[in-house]
Amino acid sequence: MDFSIREANLDDCKDIARMIMELAEYVKLAEHVKVTQKDLEQDGFSNNPFFHGIIAEVPEQHKTKEGHTKIGYALYFYAYSSWSGRAIYMEDLYVMPEFRGKGVGKALISKVAQLGLAAGCHQLNFTVLDWNKPSMDFYLSQGCFNITATMGYHCMRCEGEALKHLAQL
Amino acid sequence: MTSGGHCWTTNDIIPLLFQELAKYEEMEHQVTLTEKELLEDGFGDTPFYHCIITEIQGQNSSEDPKVVGFAMYYFTYDPWVGKQLYLEEFYVMDEYRGLGIGSGILRHLSNLAMKTRCTGMMFVVAENNEPSVQFYKRRGAEDLSQEEGWRLFRFDKDSLVKMAAPSEE
């Protein structure tokens, strides 16, 4: 199947917002999504972007029955490890169900790896849900390792009231 | 005692502090980052991270202030809820703990998170680091790995290079 991988631009935000929701639904956490298309436009495509995107696109003849040609995406940003320096963090990786198993996911993550190496990064980090076996299998087959399992690292967050309270202590 | 929000002082102590923290988490052999890289990556054209330090004034006013604590952070993005402040490293020297320095650093960062319209502050803690886990949970942090099942994964440099290589058709 013919597809192309390219950097996302402002006009892709509508499809990115759609696919973010599809990914959230896939991991059964859709009610957590608060970010809108407008937020994505502002946060990803202004002077000081907080993230970058990559889009996987198919030619017109392969579009979905709803007419979508943008069928996968990855969102990433640059991070830093105090032990090993520059890192790239892949926040989202998604391919629409009917386009899976055709190398699109591999191509997206390969692009993220290329961009990371070009920027001098030493590692690519991301999270996966523990029940998401298809994703875990895919990533493990590409040669990564599970730092939560091997080093006991847990992801923590302070938000909402807890964050406000911390700011006042 | 003053809490300094100055730029770091390119003091030799910063790499030492990293070494101390790595010893605490029993991973000192994994620190490969050099002082040169730290300087370039934090204070070059595109900073990958920001740092705040806490200094205390010596007994003698002619003494240089002493760096006793620091935090390293950067901004990340959660496509579901927006900007986050990511706390990469947070350390107070042993002999200066229990004096409110840690809380002061967290207060400063939480304020900064709110001013920059981040919806949360995120970080990673090793599950066997009981004192730190309790420190954060007392302040309202949620363990996303435990509560939602998120697992942190990593591709190291070798795996990145393999993934970035064009695949054979």
Image (cartoon, coloured by chain):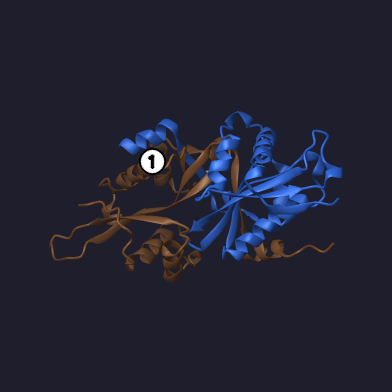
Chain colours: A blue, B brown
Q: Residue at x 14, y 66 (%)?
A: B62
- Residue B7 horizontal side relative to residue A67, left or right: left
Q: Tell me where residue B89 sits by quadrant.
A: bottom left
Q: Which residue is most to the top?
A: A31
Residue located beneath label 1 in the image: B115
Q: Label 1 is placed on what type of residue? A: Lys
Percent x, y of residue B92: 33, 54
Residue neighbourhood size for the residue with mark 1, other residues' Cα within 10 Å, grouped as few (<14), some (14–19), many (≥20):
few
User: How many labels sit on residues?
Assistant: 1
- Residue B163 horizontal side relative to residue B62, left or right: right
- Residue B57 horizontal side relative to residue A147, left or right: left
**Residue B156 shows in the view:** no
Percent x, y of residue B13: 33, 66
Callout 1: SS: helix
Q: Residue at x 39, y 45 (%)?
A: B131
Relative to B82, does residue A56 appear above or below in the rendering?
below
Percent x, y of residue B108: 33, 45
- Residue A160 horizontal side relative to residue A7, left or right: left
| Pointer 1 chain | B
Percent x, y of residue A69: 78, 42
